């Protein structure tokens, strides 16, 4: 899917551009990426068929271990257990400050929340800026304090107390400096989504509060509209976050951890309500002044946002720790690559199917280096199916660095976001002819699999990779669309000639 998308809008040889980071290129030397000429395919397939059949006869006499499909890889199991432990610690901290989970919000609490939030929406630009900056600074400050504690020395209490004030000021300055340089944890995790992060978090709070009283959301006249936007869809995935659950999943995908969405997020939310909500009524101010385990706002953000986000972070990791992603998809892809009908020719078959089904793309391949593109698509599927343990991308993982690089490449090549569904569908269709053989080989094992399950697994893996890749271009497309709408309105009101309108639209792009 990577190479296919990368050539949609390019009129120059794509082989001249690195699609993956340099360290990944060494895994596939250029001399190994040359495609076999068409006139030699039949002879090679006959030889490969004989070898493949002999290997299949040997393998058929060997019984699969009962645990081979169901056992989680030790490294992945350790990572998930460590993550669960971190999540438990943050949940305990939330319980100590804001009370135990499950405290119900009454109808009176819901009304207080809705009325208070409507006052926030009246000044939402100011509020979301204050919240987001406070959240980032709190986490940056925590990171600085951790580094200080790591280097602490055993000083007497008098010396520690005398230096406490100076040390705190220094910590705050270092935290602010980290935020200014976008080196704080939130900036590093969100990456290209940082500029829209405050809008995303505002949408998260907005929709979560609206869900408390859905029957009151029938709009009959002017009102504060929901902040979530409609997104496009294709292959079963949305190009943007349209629900609270999708926002939680987005935060998890970006590498945010429980400590990022726990006490720091709750503190930033409550602080911004106290300091950046003009015209708050007395009962709303009184609620914010109550103990953290009693106020409606504090119980809301703890139970409906922080704890739910932590729960989703655990779930997304467990979703990709199933036999489908840890065993079946990697095994299936390795067998496909070794199959005589596909060996070293997946890229060629992928582009043949793509151009047959979507002939409108032919013009983009007039000068493309198909050998290099074919090797890149194979590397892309390797990334998608073999690095299953890195799908929930930590900031410094090879997976995250690679997909971020791909995202920047696709943006610079002006790859439109509407190309991704067709490319993903074509990738799945290219692999579907091999489903029957693979499914039949696991019929009598403890982990049988169906063709539909393989399809869903491939789509899910494709979504996770493309979710990172398409965003920079989607962000640019939305910005251009808004600018074009504004220019079009100006042209209509000021009666610009068509030549002037065309010139301004070109300048916008």
Image (cartoon, rainbow, N blue to C red):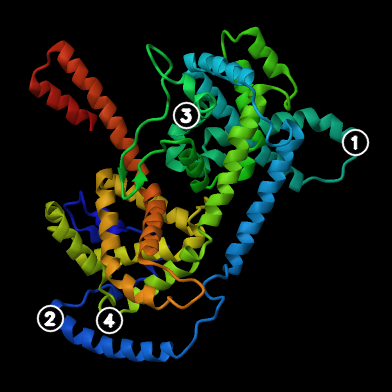
Label 3 – label 2 distance at C-alpha: 57 Å
- Viewer-nearest of discs 1 and 4: 4
Nearer to us in this view, 214 or 133: 214
Instruction: Tell me, for residue 157, which label it has, or none.
Output: 1
Instruction: Tell me, for residue 340, which label it has, or none.
Output: 4
Q: What percent of the width, then of the height, locates residue 101?
A: 69, 37
Nearer to us in this view, 418 or 504: 418
Q: Secondary structure at mark 2?
A: helix
Q: What percent of the width, then of the height, locates residue 445?
A: 48, 77
Instruction: Tell me, for residue 39, which label it has, or none.
Output: 2
Circle 3: is it few (<14), some (14-19), or many (20+) Cα within 10 Å? many
x 43%, y 76%: residue: 442
Q: Earlier in the sequence, mark 1 or mark 2?
A: 2
- Viewer-nearest of discs 3 and 1: 3
**Residue 299 visible at all:** yes
Q: Earlier in the sequence, mark 3 or mark 2?
A: 2
Residue that numbered label 3 is attached to: 203
x 18%, y 28%: residue: 505
Q: Earlier in the sequence, mark 4 or mark 2?
A: 2
The quarter of the picture where residue 381 lies is bottom left
Label 3 – label 1 distance at C-alpha: 46 Å
Residue 475's place in the image compared with 435, above or below, is: above
Instruction: Say whether marks 3 and 2 touch (CB < 8 Å).
Output: no
Q: Secondary structure at mark 4?
A: loop
Quarter of the figure with the N terminus: bottom left
Residue 6's place in the image compared with 305, above or below, is: below
Quarter of the figure with the C terminus: top left
């Amino acid at each position: 899917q990577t190479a296919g998308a990368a050539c949609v809008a390019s009129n120059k040889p794509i082989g001249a551009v690195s699609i993956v980071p340099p360290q990944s290129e060494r895994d596939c030397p250029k001399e190994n990426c040359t495609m076999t000429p068409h006139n030699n395919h039949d002879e090679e397939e006959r030889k490969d068929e004989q070898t493949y059949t002999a290997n299949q006869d040997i393998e058929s006499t060997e019984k699969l271990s009962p645990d081979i499909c169901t056992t989680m890889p030790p490294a992945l199991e350790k990572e998930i257990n460590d993550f669960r432990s971190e999540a438990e610690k943050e949940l305990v901290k939330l319980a100590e400050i804001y009370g135990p989970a499950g405290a119900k919000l009454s109808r009176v609490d819901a009304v207080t929340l809705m009325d208070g939030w409507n006052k926030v929406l009246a000044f939402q630009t100011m509020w979301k800026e204050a919240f987001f900056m406070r959240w980032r600074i709190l986490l940056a400050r925590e990171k600085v304090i951790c580094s200080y504690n790591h280097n602490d020395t055993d000083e007497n209490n008098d010396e520690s107390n005398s230096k406490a004030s100076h040390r705190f000021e220094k910590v705050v300055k270092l935290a602010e400096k980290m935020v200014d340089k976008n080196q704080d944890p939130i900036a590093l995790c969100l990456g290209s989504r940082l500029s829209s992060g405050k809008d995303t978090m505002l949408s998260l709070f907005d929709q979560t509060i609206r869900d408390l009283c859905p029957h009151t959301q029938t709009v009959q006249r002017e009102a504060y509209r929901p902040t979530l936007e409609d997104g496009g869809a294709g292959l079963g995935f949305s190009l943007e976050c349209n629900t609270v659950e999708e926002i939680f999943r987005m935060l998890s995908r970006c590498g945010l951890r429980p400590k990022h969405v726990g006490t720091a997020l709750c503190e930033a939310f409550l602080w911004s309500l106290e300091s950046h909500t003009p015209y708050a009524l007395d009962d709303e101010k009184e609620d914010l002044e109550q103990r953290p385990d009693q106020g409606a706002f504090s119980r809301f953000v703890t139970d409906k946002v922080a704890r739910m986000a932590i729960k989703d972070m655990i779930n997304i990791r467990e979703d990709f720790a199933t036999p489908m992603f840890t065993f079946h998809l990697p095994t299936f892809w390795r067998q496909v690559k070794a199959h005589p009908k596909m060996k070293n020719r997946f890229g060629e078959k992928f582009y043949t199917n793509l151009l047959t089904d979507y002939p409108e793309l032919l013009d983009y391949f007039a000068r493309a280096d198909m050998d290099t593109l074919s090797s890149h698509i194979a590397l892309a599927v390797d990334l998608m199916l073999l690095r299953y343990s890195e799908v929930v991308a930590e900031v410094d993982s090879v997976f995250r660095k690679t997909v971020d690089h791909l995202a920047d490449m696709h943006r610079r090549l002006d790859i439109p976001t509407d190309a991704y569904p067709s490319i993903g569908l074509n990738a799945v269709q290219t692999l579907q002819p091999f489903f029957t053989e693979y499914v039949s080989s696991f019929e009598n094992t403890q982990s049988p699999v169906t063709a539909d399950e393989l399809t869903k697994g491939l789509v899910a893996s494709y979504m996770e990779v493309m979710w990172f890749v398409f965003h920079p271009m989607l962000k640019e497309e939305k910005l251009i669309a808004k600018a074009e709408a504004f220019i079009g309105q100006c042209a209509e009101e000021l009666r610009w000639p068509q030549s002037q309108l065309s010139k301004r639209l070109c300048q916008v792009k």
